[in-house]
Image (cartoon, helix red, strand yellow):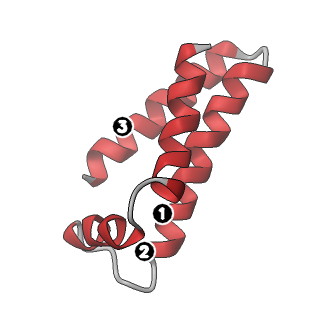
Amino acid sequence: FLLAFIWIMSGIAPLLFYPKSLSYALLASIDIPSIWQPITLYSASLIDISLGLLLLFSGQKRLIASLQILVMVCYSAIV
């Protein structure tokens, strides 16, 4: 339950509690063009929220664990 909560909140926080201008500045600092910044922000949030919901409602824990690792590796490689 706790891990699902962390994923869901990591998807919600940038959308509701963190200034979008600062999110876009962070994306710009890793050379994401301005036209792609909103798409990137919302896509990453959707991925995080989806992982959290999958943890709560799916029985395929091994697949979800693999997806979590893949997402963390991708995020780490990008940043």
Element type at mark 3: helix
Image coords of residue 19 (percent x, y): 38, 65
Q: Say which element carries label 1.
A: helix
Q: Position of residue 65 (x, y in %)?
A: 56, 20
Residue 67, quarter of picture? top right
Circle 3 packing at 10 Å, graded few (<14), some (14-19), many (20+), is few
Q: CA distance from mark 1 to mark 2?
A: 6 Å
Q: State the SS at label 2.
A: helix
| Direction from residue 62 to residue 16 in the image, left or right | left
Asked whether the residues under the numbered discs 1 and 2 touch, taking CB atoms below 8 Å apart as contact, a structural biologist would say: yes
Identity, as a three-letter code, of the amino acid under mark 2: Gln
Q: What is the three-letter code of the residue carrying label 1?
A: Leu
Residue at 63 percent across and 30 percent down: it is 52
Which quarter of the picture shows residue 37?
bottom left
Query: Is 63 located above or below residue 53 in the figure?
Result: above
Asked if residue 2 is positioned above or below residue 47 in the image, the reply reads above
Residue at (26% x, 74% y) in the render? 28
Disc number lying in front (2 or 3): 2
Q: Which residue is mark 3?
A: 73
Pointer 1 residue: 41
Label 2 belongs to which residue?
A: 37
- Where does residue 33 sit, x and y in percent of width and height? 34, 82
Answer with the quarter of the image where residue 66 lies.
top right
